[in-house]
Amino acid sequence: MEEIRVREAWRVLRIQSELVDGIDKLAGIGPSVTIFGSARLGETSRYYADAEALAARFSDAGLNVLTGGGPGIMEGANRGAFGKASCSIGLNISLPHEQSANLYQDLGINFRYFFVRKLMFVKHAVGFVVFPGGFGTMDELFEALTLVQTGKTAPFPIILFGSDFWAGLVDWLRTRMLEEGCISDTDMALFSVTDSVDEAFRIVEKSYRKTPERADNLPASM
C-alpha cells in the first residue's frame, strides 16, 4: 500500500508540473482560435486545405491558432498560421500511434495528460473550429459544448466545418436528444455548421470583436 501511495503522490506532482508549465508557456499569448480535426486527413483532403486557409486568415487578423500539434488537419491549420502575424501553437501529446509533432509550430508544448491539455485548448480560446475527425475530435467538441452550456467558460463560437460530415450527428442531436428533452433549443444554438472558410472566419472574428479584452476564458471559480 505504501508503494501505491508514493506512486500516486508522484503522479499528482507530475500533473501539477505539467499544468504549471502549460500555463506559464501560454501566459500572455492573448486570444486564440482552437482548430480540431483528424490526424488521418492529410494534404490530399480538401479539409486540410480549408484548415490551412482558415488558420492563415485568423493569424493575419491577430488571432493565434492552437491545434493538437499532430499531422492531418492539425498540420494544415498550423501550416496556415506558421510564420505569420500571430503564433502557430501545437499542444502535442504522447500517444502510441498517429501523434507526431508537425513541423509548422512557432510554439510547441508536450503533454502527457489529456485533461491538462484540454484546459489549455480552452483557456485562451475565442472560438473553436471543429473539422471532421474521430473519437478525439468528438471528445473535444462535446467538452467545449458542455463547458459553454454549463457556464464553466465564457461563451465562444463553436463551428462544425463540413456540413456533409456533420449532418448525421446534427440530425441525431435534433431528432433524439432534443426531441427526447435531453437538451434544449438553446443548446442546439451553441454551434454553427458551415462549409465556408469566409463564414467560419466571420463568425469567430465578429464574436471576438465584441469582447476583445478577454484574455482568459475561464471564470474565477475554476
Image (cartoon, rainbow, N blue to C red):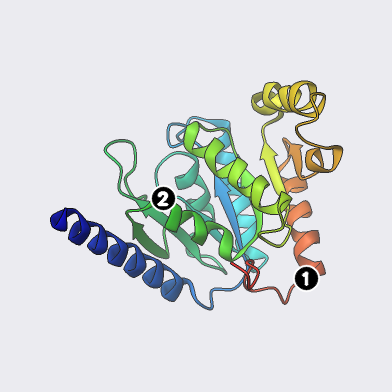
Q: For the C terminus, which image quadrant?
A: bottom right
Q: Earlier in the sequence, mark 2 or mark 1?
A: 2
Structural crowding at the residue carrying mark 1, measured as other residues with C-alpha within 10 Å and reported as few (<14), some (14–19) or many (≥20): few
At 79% from the left and 60% from the top, the residue drawn is: 207
Residue with the mark numbered 1: 211
- Seen at 67% across and 32% down, the residue is 162
Q: Position of residue 166 (x, y in %)?
A: 67, 28
Gap between marks 2 and 1 measured at Cα = 29 Å
8 on left or right of 153:
left
The one of 2 and 72 positioned closer to us in this rendering: 2
- Is disc 2 placed on a helix, strand or loop? helix
Q: Give the amino acid at mark 2.
A: Phe
Mark in front: 2 vs 1: 2
Check the image and report above or below for 18 versus 53: below
Most extreme residue toward the front, as rendered? 1
What percent of the width, then of the height, locates residue 14?
Answer: 28, 64
Residue 104 visible at all: no
Q: What kind of residue is marked 1?
A: Thr
**Location of residue 83 in the rendering, given as x and y in whole percent from the top left corner:** 48, 64
Horizontal side, residue 26 vs residue 202: left or right: left
Q: Which residue bears the numbered disc 2?
A: 114
The outermost residue toward the right is 185
Name the element at disc 1. loop
Image-quadrant location for residue 61: bottom right
Give the image quarter of residue 96. top left
Left/right of residue 53 with respect to residue 182 in the rendered view = left
On screen, residue 191 above or below 79: above
Residue at x 81%, y 60% (from the top left corner): 206
The relative height of residue 102 versus residue 41 in the rendered view (above or below) is below
Percent of width and height locating residue 184: 82, 37
- Please indicate whether residue 71 sits to the left or right of residue 28 in the image: left
**Count of labels in the image:** 2
